[in-house]
Amino acid sequence: MRATLAGILAVAAAPVIAGAPRVAVDVGHTLAAGGATSARGRAEFEFNRDLARDLVAALSARAVAVTLVNEDGLIPTLAARPEAAGEVDLFVSIHHDSVSESELERWTWNGQPRTYSDAWQGHSLFVSQDNPDLPRSLLCARSIGARLQRMGFVPTEKNARRRAWADRQLAVHYYDNLVVLYRTRLPAVLFEAGVIKNRDEELALMDPARRTRMADGIATGILACLSVEPLSAAKAP
């Protein structure tokens, strides 16, 4: 049975955050190290920045105090990202996924040789068991995942080949040694919006209306998870 947002939040007890929630939205990668390259040759950083900006707008519309980290793509280190967030209730790092080299196929786009893989598509989420507030991190990841699935967004199981499940139904994985998830005082979630090496999903992820809708779902999930107190970080059944 598909998890509902109400079901995920049933583990919570009472309102916890007084005043406006505070969230940091981190643009993954940089101008110099752009991350993965899409099937048509666009840097992951550009996808990340577009979705991060839409998420900031969606959170701001809900009266959330938002800090956008690394919008200019010039942040010097991974450790500097949580530091730049300041005192917030949640740190969310926005990324887009790729595939392994062995899965890539060759094609030509606009006269340029490119690589692609249409084998995988869909979003996924990551938390670290070494984060100082794993219960909150995990609750927020589950809340985001539940909301997106309720809206019709389909997750991927691609990353289960290397990362253990925290919640398989909601596509949440453990990624314990990722700097932005554990080297911080903040609850933290990394969100992979989709697979940009997939030619169809690449175009979908570039569509402004779909991107705005995804950002709206993420924002709804964030606001829900910050309104309650998680009881534990127990794995989902």
Image (tube, grey):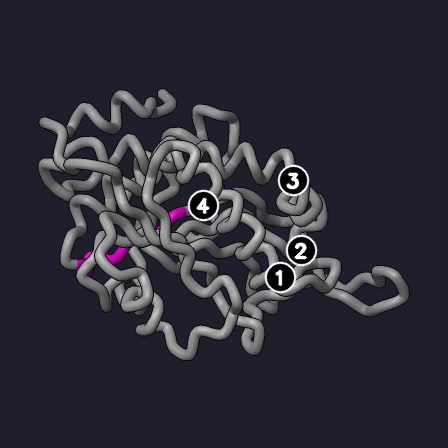
Local SS, label 2:
loop
Q: Could you tell me how far apart the alpha carbons at marks 2 and 4 are, in whole angstroms?
A: 30 Å
- State the image coordinates of residue 26 (x, y, percent, origin top left): 41, 58
Residue at 35% across / 35% down in the picture? 63
Foreground: 49 or 163?
A: 49
**Label 4, label 1: how many angstroms apart (C-alpha)?**
34 Å
Kindly check if marks 4 and 1 are in contact, taking CB atoms under 8 A apart as contact: no
Identify which amino acid the numbered label 3 is placed on. Pro
Is there CB contact under 8 Å for labels 2 and 4?
A: no
Identify residue for label 1: 103
Dot 1: element: helix
Asked whether 128 falls inside the magenta stretch, the response is yes
Residue drawn 51% across the image and 47% down it: 193
Mark identifier at residue 208: 3
- Of the numbered discs 3 and 1, the one sitting upstream in the chain is 1
- Cβ atoms under marks 2 and 1 closer than 8 Å: yes
Compared across the picture, whether 95 is left or right of 39 comes to left
Whether residue 114 sits left or right of residue 24 in the image: it is right
Amino acid at pointer 2: Ser
Residue 31 visible: yes
Q: Which residue is mark 2?
A: 117
* Residue nearer the viewer, 210 or 178: 210
Residue range in magenta is 125-131
Give the distance between the C-alpha atoms of the residues marked 2 and 1, in whole angstroms. Answer: 6 Å
Would you call the spot at circle 4 few (<14 residues within 10 Å), some (14-19), or many (20 or more)?
many
Q: Nearer the viewer, mark 4 or mark 1?
A: 4
